[in-house]
Image: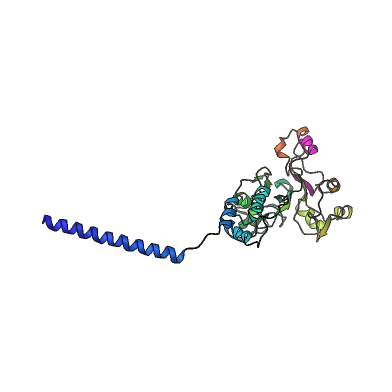
Amino acid sequence: MQNLSIVTVLLASTVLGALAIAMGCVLGWANRIFHVDVDATVEAILNALPGANCGACGFLGCAEYAEAVAKREAAVDLCIPGGARCAEKLAEIMGVEFSEVVPYRAVVHCSACEKQRLHRSEYRGESTCVAANLVAYVQGCTYGCLGLGDCVRACPHDAIHIRDGLARVDYDRCTGCGVCVRACPRGVLSTVPFKSDSMLVVACSNQDFGPDVKAVCKVGCLGCGLCARENSLIEMHGHLPDIDYAEYDPESRIGAIAEKCPRGCLIFVGKPTTTETTEATNAGLAEDRVQYDRSCVLSPAGTEHAGG
């Protein structure tokens, strides 16, 4: 009986050893047959990229973008989260000249907080913008921010928060990846080139005629066209002004037109200007509340915007 046990153990060990050798041979064969050489350039580019896989470069992810750059089918400055530092590294790897990259940041084309939106009704459905956007009469304006935070949940950098029912961008955190833009069912967000710390933007998305806008929002653009007549960098597209950021010059007086807008729809976002910081301080507000709050809170008593 003891001899039988020893034979069994030896037989099992032999079989397992043979199987291990066979599997090793198979794996070695598969490694040679299916081996894919990794391009050293692609690997170097991947190591230089932030690995966000956000798709802001126009490719499905960092790996696809790295391959395109290595094949010289894509520019080295398309990685928005990586910014200028990343572009400089990629240019060095590819042996091409590098020119300074203008960073892109997200902006919200709506400045109406809850008390400035008219004909609002109680919404009891799923607490997402995508779901609320399918329900009629959630609020009078069918173009503006719904304030349910789809952009907040989508942002990988915790750069957007909802305050007073309106999405606000934290420009100390925003990388301009564009994930929030794709998450918004109403197209309220976009990314623009920040040629300076503070950029002028159109804070409205309503495409309707002036009287219709006035009926649903206290600060919505009326499409009067005053800004376009006053400055050549602004053109009217339908009933909304559009700023030509390709020709935008921070040193020009384009910001002066913001003070003439009867509804306050042209506002500065980003790092607050000295004037805005002073106004906020005089109004007893914290400096970090200046960003995108001109229409809602830049007044001592929290009253509505003068244009409303």
The foreground one among 259 and 58 is: 58
Q: Residue furthest bottom?
A: 33
Image spot of residue 87 (x, y percent): 67, 51
Quadrant where the image shows the N terminus: bottom left
Left or right placement of residue 65 versus residue 279 in this view = left
Q: Is residue 281 above or below residue 241?
A: above
Image spot of residue 6 (x, y percent): 16, 56
Colouring convention used in this rendered image of the protein: rainbow
The foreground one among 184 and 254 is: 254
Q: Residue furthest right?
A: 230
Q: Is residue 3 visible?
A: yes
Left or right placement of residue 54 versus residue 249 in this view = left
Image spot of residue 37 (x, y percent): 51, 61
Image spot of residue 234 (x, y percent): 83, 55
Please say whether residue 189 is one of the residues in the magenta stretch: no
The foreground one among 306 and 104 is: 104
What residue lies at 25% left-to-right and 61% top-to-bottom? 15
> What is the span of residues highlighted in magenta in the rendered image?
265-280
Q: Is residue 50 visible?
A: no
